Amino acid sequence: MKEKKEKRHVSYAKWGLIFIAPFFIAYIIFSLAPQIITIYNAFFENYRSGLTIVGPNFVGLRNFVSLFTPDANGTIDILKYTGNTLLMWVEGAIPQIVIALLLAIFFTSYRLKIKGQGFFKAVIYMPNMIMASAFSMLFFTLFSNVGPVNQVIQAMGWADATIDFFSMTVTVRGMIALMNFLMWFGNTTILLMAGIMGIDQSMFEAANIDGANSLQTFFRVTLPLLKPILVYTIITAMIGGLQMFDVPQVLTNGFGVPNRTTMTLVMYLNNFLSGKNYGMSGAVSVILFIVTGILSLITFRSLRTQSEEA
């Protein structure tokens, strides 16, 4: 008798787990474990004073109390730096979202049918490939006291003396917001373009047949269907904005000039890390995590509620 060959059963669930296992292993080692250690350090006194290492000593919530204790001038540093960070993010994020949305609609319009979209995507995305430090050094050179901007202003007769752009809060914050806008609007444009291209073209054709103009099509068809991608874009932009560091760090040499008005939360955190004060740096990280989570939740809930009401 011939033995029947048994069919081998392939466990796709097992292989699926094997393929996704490297991600979870890397996440636990390089992300989750450091987060837990950071939260743990926030409750300890652990720093270096000269050649002497103090701690780790458990101090409970003392590090958090210290963060919210006013200094001699009555200023609570962490609140001031949180305000600086949010303000500079808003200044760069609002034009970033608006212009990216307009460009995405323009390049994906079925009425205009613009050719060479791949070329335009590459050109728009190119500023995102420039390192933030290089961008900052470029702006520092352009707007320095002996830079080309001052030379042009004096040559045109618009000012008799050199303008110190780095002594004015408005100009320094404006430069930081402008750099963040230039670096990230291309990435946002491509994400929104992908979202619009994912909308069924029959929706636009139906709106056109019904006599809807461009504005009506945008507000009645495009924007409601683009809400999920728009929510994702705003939340990720906000998370990146709260973690703003490299641009103001290089542009102001880490001092947040003038008068710490451009000092961000992560720059404040970096000052503790440079002094090996792991307890205070852990406390700032926990505060940053909580603020990011609360603002992300508020943004998500508000935009989702508007979408459901629509």
Image (cartoon, rainbow, N blue to C red):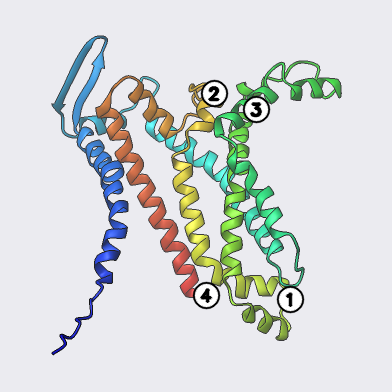
Residue 282 lies, with reference to residue 32, above or below; the image says: above
Q: Is residue 52 visible?
A: yes
First in sequence: mark 1 vs mark 2: 1
Q: Which residue is mark 2?
A: 252
Q: Which residue is mark 1?
A: 213
Q: CA distance from mark 3 to mark 2?
A: 13 Å
Element type where label 3 sits in the image: helix
First in sequence: mark 4 vs mark 3: 3
Q: Position of residue 239 (x, y in %)?
A: 44, 47
Instruction: State the mark number for residue 310.
Output: 4
Element type where label 1 sits in the image: loop
Residue 189 lies, with reference to residue 70, above or below; the image says: below
Q: CA distance from mark 1 to mark 2?
A: 48 Å
| Residue 120 quadrant | bottom right
Instruction: For label 2, count other residues whose C-alpha is less than 10 Å away and answer few (under 14), some (14-19) or many (20+).
Output: many
Q: Is residue 76 visible?
A: no
Q: Which residue is mark 3?
A: 138
